[in-house]
Image: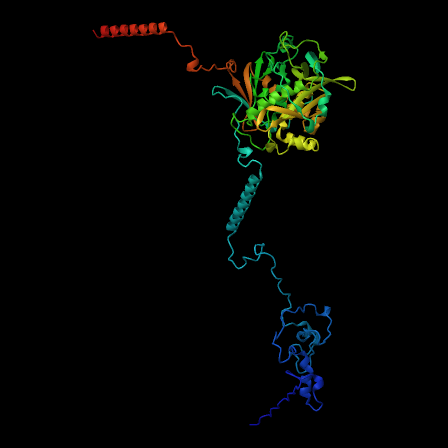
Amino acid sequence: MVTEAFEFVAVPFNSDGWGPPDASDVSSSASPTSVAAANLLPNVPFASFSRSDKLGRVADWTRNLSNPSARPNTGSKSDPSAVFDFSAFAIDEGFGLASSGGNPDEDAAFRLVDGKPPPRPKFGPKWRFNPHHNRNQLPQRRDEEVEAKKRDAEKERARRDRLYNNNRNNIHHQRREAAAFKSSVDIQPEWNMLEQIPFSTFSKLSYTVQEPEDLLLCGGLEYYNRLFDRITPKNERRLERFKNRNFFKVTTSDDPVIRRLAKEDKATVFATDAILAALMCAPRSVYSWDIIIQRVGNKLFFDKRDGSQLDLLSVHETSQEPLPESKDDINSAHSLGVEAAYINQNFSQQVLVRDGKKETFDEANPFANEGEEIASVAYRYRRWKLDDNMHLVARCELQSVADLNNQRSFLTLNALNEFDPKYSGVDWRQKLETQRGAVLATELKNNGNKLAKWTAQALLANADMMKIGFVSRVHPRDHFNHVILSVLGYKPKDFAGQINLNTSNMWGIVKSIVDLCMKLSEGKYVLVKDPSKPQVRIYEVPPDAFENDYVEEPLPEDEQVQPTEENTEGAEASVAATKETEEKKADDAQA
């Protein structure tokens, strides 16, 4: 058996340190194989080191070789990563790959080491959202994922609600949606409900009426004192009380002038400005109110009950902040309504010129007696044409008169009242001078229905200007003493445009209610605003309904008149005599 001789490769000796020597250090007498190996030594991935150094990495797997052309190939030893650079690997006959056939282009494009960039470090806190956190978990069912998302959304919603409730000024009150309002009138079981009209139908109505004609002007007006236009929160004015002046809240059917006009057949429908304003602004109302409708022959009368909700002024009716429900609380809806009514009456008389000239009209006040001190008020009886066979007469009120541009101008006087800045969120004493628009916007949000009704009454009375006063309590817990902080004036038509009050829609609501009531038979009806839903209902009631609303309460025992002793003895004797006669009758019956 013939065997080939095995040739041992000569290993060069490195006298300077460890590792193979440089190609320049190899002697010329060395074999060609050793010389070729020496020439390939710079491409072998060994980092240069000395005996005193510790071994670092053998190979660098983190280098990015995806774009080797962008990096200049210097090949210098100063580059610490040059020894790991295989991009310039020289292919020769000793180290060629069989599959490539020695093609340098194919070998340069081939990479054994992963060239992807290393993953970015996860900086930041641990609670940051990581979409790949639960990648290794088993996939959940689709319905379970939906339920999990719903639970997470519900938790987030509850957290936001908790945050909202904690940030509110008054965290002890419930939300306004949960507040329960009572009906303005007790619905009796014998009443028959005829119609139920939602407010959504009112918003679509529109009707245009012609300019009305003035039939009569009664009463007397005092002139407005312009000094009140200069009042600011810094020089506030104390609100006075006018106990000696009489204010009249007479319903339609009790008005002697309207009775006279009905006999003269001046119209078919009769009402007051307060009742018409309640109908016109019904979609803005939240509290319950009621109007009595009487159909007499071909006439239609819109009345109000004595002590009706229409005689009071609502406060914070359209606000989202609930008011205390107890009537004994000074900030309850009923207590604030009574307080606002008194403030409005006193304010309308205080801003007038004292002992000045008065403007008188055709007739005197139809409700006042001789020698009686009455408030400054004028009643304007106006007639509108609803269609060819139907006219409406309404009694409209004016509170004052002024000379504007050398012309006589009629005014309406009303007052907004602030009872506690915590409920509205705006302190009038701080914002009225600098941010009047913000104060008015807040009042439009909290008392939108009341301001709309005042504007409607000013439009019905054809007032040239409506004065609105801002009256506040001296102290939030004192509901007897008030101060006037400011007085602003607006033209009714311009103000109606600001609060988005459409006159065509107002008359469309009135026309639809009138047409509906004219189809009813003669009798008495009541229109009630639902206390919890945006709708009104019409009930048929007995003719004597609301006439005996006053119930006399029995006196306490200590205030009752006690009978005398003689009367008591006589009463005892009569009782004893009746007992004896009853016993005798019983004995005779047994015999």
Going 72% across and 69% down the picture, which residue do you hit? 71
Q: Give 563 or 12, whichever is nearer the viewer.
A: 563
Residue lying at the far right in this picture: please name it.
Answer: 406
Q: Nearer the viewer, residue 273 or 392?
A: 273
The quadrant holding residue 230 is top right
Q: Position of residue 488 (x, y in %)?
A: 70, 26
Q: Quadrant of residue 480?
A: top right
Tell whether 249 sits left or right of 234: left
Q: Is residue 442 above or below residue 152?
A: above
Quadrant (top left/top right/bottom left/bottom right) for the C terminus: top left
- The coloring applied to the image is rainbow
Residue at the farthest bottom position: 1
Q: Is residue 190 left or right of residue 121?
A: left
Above or below, 199 against 103 in this view is above
- In the rendered image, is residue 202 in sight? no
Q: Which of the two residues, 277 or 558, is positioned nearer the viewer here?
A: 558
* Percent of width and height locating residue 586: 25, 8
Picture quarter containing residue 574? Answer: top left
Front-most of 540 and 166?
Answer: 166
Q: Look at the image and tell me whether residue 528 can be seen.
A: yes
Q: Quadrant of the N terminus?
A: bottom right
How far across and how far down the image is residue 569, in percent?
33, 6
User: Could you tell me how many numbered marks the image carries?
Assistant: 0
Does residue 411 lie above or below 14 as drawn? Answer: above
Find residue 406 and report its horizontal and vertical position in percent: 79, 17
Q: Residue furthest left?
A: 591
